[in-house]
Amino acid sequence: MNQFEQQIDQYLDLDYGITARQAIVEQLYNAVSKAAMKSLSFSEQSGKKGCYFSAEFLLGRLIYSNLLNLGLLERCRTYLNQNGFDAGVFESIDDDALGNGGLGRLAACFLDSAATHGIPLNGFGIRYKYGLFHQYFQDGFQKETADDWLKAGDPWGIRGESEAVTVKFADQTVRAIPYDMPVIGYGGNTVNRLRLWQAEPLSAFDFEQFNLQKYDEAVEERIRAEEITAVLYPNDDTPAGKQLRLKQQYFFTSASLQSLVKEFLQKHGESFSHFPKEFAIQLNDTHPVIAIPELLRILMEEHQLSFDEAFPIVRDTFAYTNHTIMAEALEKWEVSLFLTVAPQVYPYVVLLQNALNREIKERNIEQQDKAALQIISGGQIHMARLAVYASHATNGVAKIHSELLKSNVLPEWYRMYPERFQNKTNGITQRRWLALCNQELSGFINERIGNGWVTDLNQLKRLTAYLDDSASLAQFREIKRQKKIQLCNHVRIHEYGFELNPDFIFDVQIKRLHEYKRQLLNAFSILDIYFAIKDGTLTDFTPTAFLFGAKAAPGYRRAKGIIKFINEIARLISADPEVKDKLQVLFVQNYNVSYAEKLIPAADVSEQISTAGTEASGTGNMKLMLNGAVTLGTLDGANIEIVEQAGEENNYIFGATVDEIAQLSNTYHPKALYESNPRIRRVVDTLIDGTLDDGDTGLFRELYDSLLKGVSWHKPDQYYLLQDFESYCEAKLRANRDYRNAEEFSHKCLANTARAGYFSSDRTVREYAQEIWGI
Ligand code: 26Q
């Protein structure tokens, strides 16, 4: 009894010589985390193991979720309170933000789900010294600062000195040291592992031996090694062909494979044909695809297998997940650059290309398909093609996305290997995204259907019995209001005293800033509402707070321009007493996993408004649905499956479909829409007519031109904002009107929660395990 609490006291005493009451947050954080760790041991994993290779794991703050899964959250709360602390003290501890957005967060959800269900799945990635940058606004412009996430210590990471390996590059050899983090399943029964590799120089300083010149060289060597894992690349779209980026990819995949091969040799000796029965490696997008030729190299060069022996092993081991639709975002590497990083691997890419050529010859491939069926082409290595060819499964992340992979992105490959293409619709972990972040709604659910949903989300279906129960709906609204008030309090502290009104509708768009996600369309619709209220043509508007959260890649000019634009709209509206009681606009700073945990439970309306055919899946859409927000969205990504589950009558769908966009694309004339539609003209003109000020940066003019003139690399309004503008505004105002009928609207909200079961990542991971990994 009291083991856990005593352990905390002991660590505080041992490490700092203090009692809990004397501790500062960082000390408490380390002591509590270490006390929780103390009770753990990694699970014995028998049988085939899944290995999730990902350049990103966006874990968020670990302490609360780990305590939740260990069943220690309540005890920790009591302990903190007894020692004079608020349970929220750890909210000042930084997130683990070793990822950009959806793809990295998905990896984190998968690990949680696998551990919860006893599926042996380990993660492999990079221990960046600096994660995704922190964002703040200065005069409405995004500014970035470094994310020094290790400053409070890393109590969850265990350095594995004895399991270090070396990784060779053309111009240097470095040591890769694993830091293992426990991935604790709900209930604490399974503890899987996330292994993050850190780059260090081969040998530590040896001051005695060094003359001055050697000392300088050693310093230089250390800097060049540590550079490899120094920082996460902050763009999550167009892959810039940076040498360091490829170094990161080779670094962590080579290290991971070495540790797997070592483990395999200890167990099975050199009988490598057994390798795919021991490990299934899932490649999270193309970022870790260099692992494919690297494993081939290891088998052939270091273990003397022939190509014909090694290739089937490689193919049966790997599977590839695609997360992007837009062809220009598919990763390619110049051969010349590749050779400056890992020249020893390149011959194995060539071997794969040669085998592919033989296969193309044997089959009767249509001439027109042949160009796209080249891994090496135009002096570049096409990583997605390499992945499809040398793996046994390729999947998209939502139904429509998987269809588009077959028809638009990789059609030639689909014709060649139809049996390899699969769909695995994304999911989210209900532990973090409901049990932890919305304990009030969790309690509401538990009172009605018990807590089985925590590990079996389909049980939420049983809430449908309460969809017409006025008392339940009233209680649901009361909870939503509580979560709004909590958000208001958070916002007051973190956004310079901004007074959000909890009586307003909370309309939320939170996701990375991208043109295709169309935050600019949302901004236009807000201006349209603003002008209509001012003109007196919109009189029955239910007061709404429009909330945004998004980071823009630091080099993405237009994305930064859109942030500035929305911040200027916020300024315009907050300075206008005529609309004060009707409209609020807030772009929160430094949107991250922890901020999401505050925003999502408070949302009434979930903005999912990407151009149809551009968002692979989306996962924020699922988190908001689970927390009882209605979706205001296009038929894109997983939105389609969301309305399939929850019913179109409980959501607000608008805009052109994928097929309609395809129909339109050749004849689309946004300028004509602009000229013929005064509402469109009025909102678009705010970019250039002086209504809003971009501080003479020219950013707003560039946005204007991107919509109406186009530029050398794309046609005007490539994401069809003006096309969808009217139907979007119509749907938004329809939701706004519907909200006034509280009972009907909360029925819709609760219907969304009740039908969110399909979107548990527990379901997704089970599908991967059964249909791809054979676990
Ligand atoms: C690649 C090369 C160089 C630098 C950066 C990158 C890079 C990094 C991250 C490219 C892409 C990403 C991330 C992509 C991503 O998050 N995609 C999202 O994945 C989610 C999970 O499947 C989907 O729900 C989203 O629809 C998709 O946009």
Image (tube, rainbow, N blue to C red):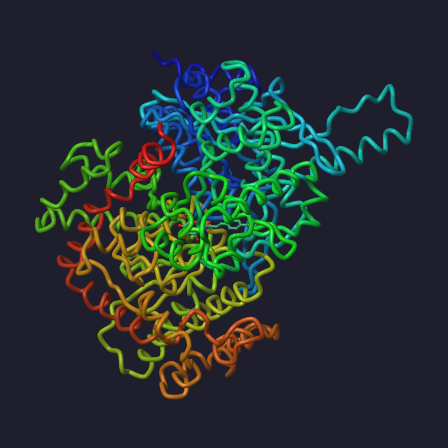
* Number of marks present in the image shown: 0
**Residue under the image location 84 percent in, 22 percent down:** 207
Q: Which quarter shows the C terminus? A: top left
For the question of whether residue 349 can be seen, the reply is yes
**Residue under the image location 19 percent in, 45 percent down:** 754
Q: Give above or below for 186 relative to 59.
A: above
In front here: 446 or 539? Answer: 446
Judged left or right of residue 210, residue 383 is left
For the question of whether residue 234 can be seen, the reply is no
Judged left or right of residue 445, residue 373 is right
Question: At which x and y percent is residue 366?
Answer: 46, 58
Question: At which x and y percent is residue 515?
Answer: 47, 65
Identify the image quadrant of residue 697: bottom right
Identify the image quadrant of residue 529: bottom left
Q: Which quarter shows the N terminus? A: top left
Question: At which x and y percent is residue 255?
Answer: 60, 29
Identify the image quadrant of residue 407: bottom left
**Residue under the image location 25 percent in, 40 percent down:** 440
- For this orientation, the residue located farthest to the top is 1
**Residue under the image location 59 percent in, 21 percent down:** 160
Q: Give above or below for 40 relative to 199.
A: above
Question: At which x and y percent is residue 626?
Answer: 27, 46
Judged left or right of residue 675, residue 655 is left
In front here: 362 or 59? Answer: 362
Q: Give above or below for 86 relative to 759.
A: above
In front here: 433 or 757? Answer: 757
In front here: 613 or 706? Answer: 613
